[in-house]
Amino acid sequence: PGPELKVTGIDFLKSQNCPQHHTDAYSIKQLVVRRGQPFQLQLTLSRELRASDKLALRFGIGETPMKNRGTLMSLKPNKEPDFSGWKISIIKNNGKECLLSVTSSPSAAVGKYKLHVKTGTNMYKPENSEVYVLFNPWCKDDVVFLDDEAKRKEYVLNDTGCIYVGSAYSISSRPWNFGQFEEFVLDACMYLLDKSPLKLGHRRDPVAVSRAMSALVNANDDSGVLMGNWSGNYSNGTSPLDWIGSVSILQQYYKTKKPVCYGQCWVFAGVLTTVMRCLGVAARCITTFNSAHDTDENLRLDVYFNEQGKKMDTMSFDSVWNFHVWNDVWMKRGDLPAGFDGWQAIDATPQEQSQGAFQCGPSPLKAVKEGDVYLPFDCKFVYAEVNADQVYWLVTKVNGRDKFYRLSTQTQGIGLNISTKAVGEDKREDITLEYKFPEGSEQERRAMQRACSFIRPAGLSPRAHYASTWSSSMEAEPRVLRESVNKSGLQIEISNTAPLYPGNPLELAITLKGTTPGSCTVSLVGSCQLQAYTGKVLGDLGSIKETIKIEGRAEKQIPLKIAPEEYMKTLSSVEDEVLIHITTIAEVKETNDKLTKEMTKRFEYPPITIQMPEKAKLNQEFICSFIFKNKLNVSLNNCKLMVEGLGLFKMTTFDQGDLPSGRIMKSEIICKPTRVGEKKIVAKLTSDQVKAISAEKSITITE
């Protein structure tokens, strides 16, 4: 038989395999491939391979790979195919070089495989022998297959993006660097898979993997990636507003293996997008405005106003967040009846426990839309977030006790303008219709009836923390709520008559419009508060109380003006971005109609300007400068500028000190591009007074 066969070397042919597998952007030494797709390996042997030689490539995953568990694949060329669904063949056998093609199963477990090559009794263990196997949205036999190249580019390969925040009627976009290809990010994701309770066999299933990741991105019960904090004090960590991407969070977590402080919903969603895209599942960040956080899944939120029209947030068990961000991931649902494939909602923000852990989803958008809320996982919760109805109550003191009067019911105020970044462009795409039928449509109420047959709707008694007495006209039987009817035809609009710059007076106006002939007398109370994005009241700014006569179709504007000294102190004392919340109650004397209206607005800020060339060459330095002029009437104290450019420079922070009104600051950074293509630079400025001014700019890098 001659000398025995030994392997003397192996080439993972990264420069050929990675571009074919769309994995060439990962900053990692090892080979990264996607499952169900062939890749090539070149063996160098001690002599030519003969037909009688025994050759086996062994791919093992986990601590102790075993054939009978499906965690060890022993692949022999020219032998009958392996029952594991993996395939191997010899492409070229030439002297001492042997070129092999390996195809993993389209349902292979995702993770790190060690490769050993066995020849006869010899075992060859190459250096850097791990092969990372990921989900494959390009492979039609993979359950995460997405049949659209533009969508794959956006939802799997785009490492930058933006997350929508603000309020339903003044939406703003916050740039976010996902950075799924940066150093240590893939290893951090592998560490999370190892840390998860998933058995190796469950790692083939994106339903199980995405559910596990929704639990591990928060630190609530498994020392996962991020610790949530909504207190307004972040002094012993990083303020949630100071992050501009997932990279520094995942790198810090991988280095320390301890939860990173602190996150709020958009940070959890940004990191979960990074993790899912990194593992090869199409993922997007979803923002829902006026998202319901209903503590007992009964599709109803109670909102309490006092006689000045102020919102009493401490009374409610449930809250409406001005916005809430979660994720959609794309996959087939083999575990469900037909018809629920496609986008699935998952949420890493720790709000409610599901099956004993802070995890949420995957919940099929189709099930949420149709009201099939009994389907796994957590459809009831997601359904309530976008569909709950609101009941408004007036709380009055009678003989020292609270008395409750029902003002109105609103069925169309929750789950508005559901937004995500558009495919291939920096625009907002409205996907509300993927989550729900048009408000007020027959299908929408039918879906609500369907959902209500699985969720116990509450009766209409107030559920305040201390509701002891209420007016006797209450009915207790559960039912689907209907929108209040407005007999008087009176309309209320809330607007600002000047830009809302911090340091300026807030010039707001409440406009009453008559839409029917005849006159009416309206007693109006209006109130303005500062609010966190979670709806928590941070300060009362002022209120008005007036009686107004409206003649026919006339309109009356009632100004509400708030001086800067009323609110600037609150702005500096909390470390969150603060929103302006206006509430009104109008009572029409003639018809006894009670109308309620709420509006949230955000402050406006001067811009950051980013200056740099439009194009640059690989490995050639260029300068990027950041310019900010403080056009506000107040000095900005303790200014910090955070900048990051993936593939250009590492995250950098400039401490700028105080910036008086009218002054300009300029910072420069030297960029050295390490990757070609369109790259983005993101900048964010925070100070004591103003928390979240951000900007982004793109540059094209060529060879």
Image: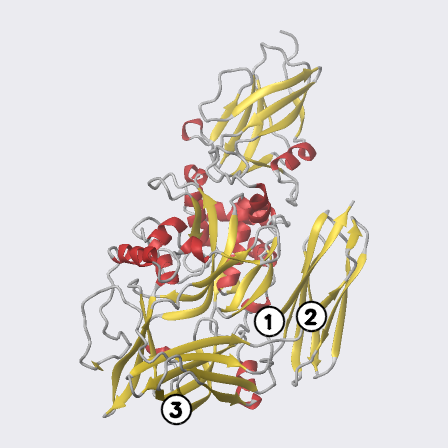
Amino acid bearing label 1 = Ala
**Would you call the spot at circle 3 few (<14 residues within 10 Å), some (14-19), or many (20 or more)?**
some
The disc at residue 549 is 3
SS assignment at label 1: loop
Residue 73 lies, with reference to residue 34, above or below; the image says above
Residue type at mark 3 is Lys
Q: Where residue 700 sits in the image (x, y, percent)?
A: 74, 52
In the rendered structure, find residue 399 and report the number of the disc placed on it: none
The residue that disc 1 covers is 692
Q: Nearer the viewer, residue 194 or 629?
A: 629
Tell me if residue 137 comes above or below residue 294 in the rendering.
above
> Residue 82: where, in percent of width, then height?
47, 22
Distance between the alpha carbons at the discs numbered 2 and 1: 11 Å
The Cα–Cα distance between marks 2 and 3, rounded to whole angstroms, is 46 Å
Is 256 displayed left or right of 383 in the figure? right
Residue at the image position 25 percent from the left and 55 percent from the top: 454
Report helix, strand or loop for mark 2.
strand
Q: Which residue is mark 2?
A: 608
Q: Earlier in the sequence, mark 2 or mark 3?
A: 3
Closer to us: 449 or 146: 449
